[in-house]
Amino acid sequence: MAAMNRSYVIILANGLNGLGAVRSAAHAGLKTYTLLTAQSDLSAYSRFSQYRFLLPLNPTVNDIRPILDQLNNNEGGPGVLLACSDFAAELLGKLKQEGYSNQHLIVPTTETTEVLNDKKLECHYMEQGGITLPKTYYELGEDVPESFPLIIKPRTFREYKVLGAKNVIVHSVAELNEFKQRFRAHLDQFIAQEVIQGGDDNLWVCNVTFDHNQELSACFVFKRLGTMPSHYGVTSLAISQNNQALREECAKIGKALNYTGPAMIEFKKDQYSDTYYYIETNPRLGMCNWFDTRCGINNILACTQAAYGNRVEFAPQRNNFVYWNFFGDLIARLEDRENLLAIVFRYIALLRRRRIGALLYWKDPQPALRYAKASITDIAQRVGRKLRERFG
């Protein structure tokens, strides 16, 4: 894809999301500035992340505004701001609310971002909009669940620290009561939903971009095959597969939310009814955005073109490509006590498909080497602890 005149992007990077965005921007020929909150962030090791700014650990709009003003001055015009985390999405929403105009902001309104970053508000909003959700319980202290298992979710990313995890699964009234007792002072910070039946391959993700008219300008669809942690985490193994029903559902969600910008929309297909249930919308670039790009749908380019008021037409996505975070997927399966021989056979079967590494990219090897070193150290420490528990 040829570079666009004077176009540049400013990526508020975070982990795999940020690394993928930096690589995708380079793939599109876009000049890229990266804003980081840690020197050890994966994108800091990318050869494509040539212009970097280090921010405080919890930056405010006052921390980023001078950098954005400076870049506007240096480049002779605005670039495009892209968020790779929920926190960064909130920052960009606040800039938009302030009327900031020295950089292009292709982001939803502050109100929409606040709704989507609060699971209770989000689920209420979607139910009112006619979107199919799992049975949801909003008042954990009072609601009586009709069935189990339940997945308990923090309302916002800030409550992850309260819970100590992204979510918790409870399988009975006794486990739910134990949870209520443990977190009795924080029950208003969680919601619960029924767990839709089906394995990891019933989980679907759509990485999308909506333009300023809330039209779906890019959509990449994939089916998960593995998550970390297993069954209820982020993508560790996936396959690209188009799904027209989900494309139509995403278009409907964008209109209902009056949404502009990138989003990651998740669904789960019930294995018995073939119904697709809405899980969540993340108001930012999806973690697997590099997978999108390698399969022909570059959401970073789509965001940039939409911000500059241009249209971009993508060919149909390439299907049956496999996304693989080897170490993350392996650790998740071992922690889930999956049979080692079954894991080996699963991985051998993947070798016949075209594979796209979550980190491994021959033109940009250092992030993968850093991640591999950290993962091998982590595995060795886990094995050491297990051996000490067994023989110590």
Image (cartoon, helix red, strand yellow):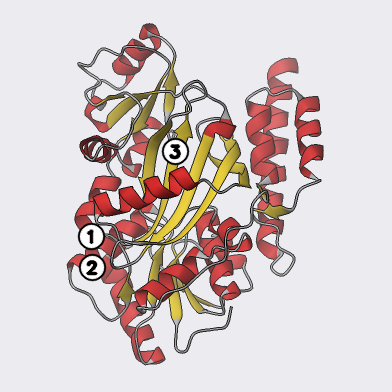
| Residue, disc 3 | 267
Instruction: State which tag comes first along the sequence, 3 or 1.
Output: 1
For residue 205, side relative to residue 145 (left or right): right
How far, Cα to Cα, is label 2 from label 3? 29 Å
> Tags 1 and 2 in contact by the CB under 8 Å rule?
yes
Which of the pair 384/271 is nearer the observer?
Answer: 271
Residue at image coords 57%, 32%: 200
Q: Nearer the viewer, mark 3 or mark 1?
A: 3
Q: Nearer the viewer, mark 2 or mark 3?
A: 3
How far, Cα to Cα, is label 3 from label 1? 23 Å
Instruction: State which tag comes first along the sequence, 1 or 2.
Output: 2
**Residue 212 horizontal/vertical position (percent):** 29, 68
How far, Cα to Cα, is label 1 from label 2? 7 Å
Q: Secondary structure at mark 1?
A: loop
| Residue, disc 2 | 96
Task: Residue type at mark 2: give it.
Answer: Lys
**Residue 100 horizontal/vertical position (percent):** 22, 75
* Image position of 358 with respect to 99: above or below: above
Residue at image coords 27%, 54%: 255
For residue 348, side relative to residue 91 (left or right): right
For residue 151, side relative to residue 155 (left or right): right
Task: Residue type at mark 3: give it.
Answer: Phe
Q: Secondary structure at mark 3?
A: strand
Determine which quarter of the picture holds residue 389.
top right
How many other residues sit within 10 Å of disc 1, few (<14), some (14-19) or many (≥20)? many
**Can residue 7 be spotted in the picture?**
yes
> Residue at the top extreme?
174
Instruction: State which tag comes first along the sequence, 2 or 3.
Output: 2
The quadrant of the image that shows the N terminus is bottom right
Task: Residue type at mark 1: give it.
Answer: Thr
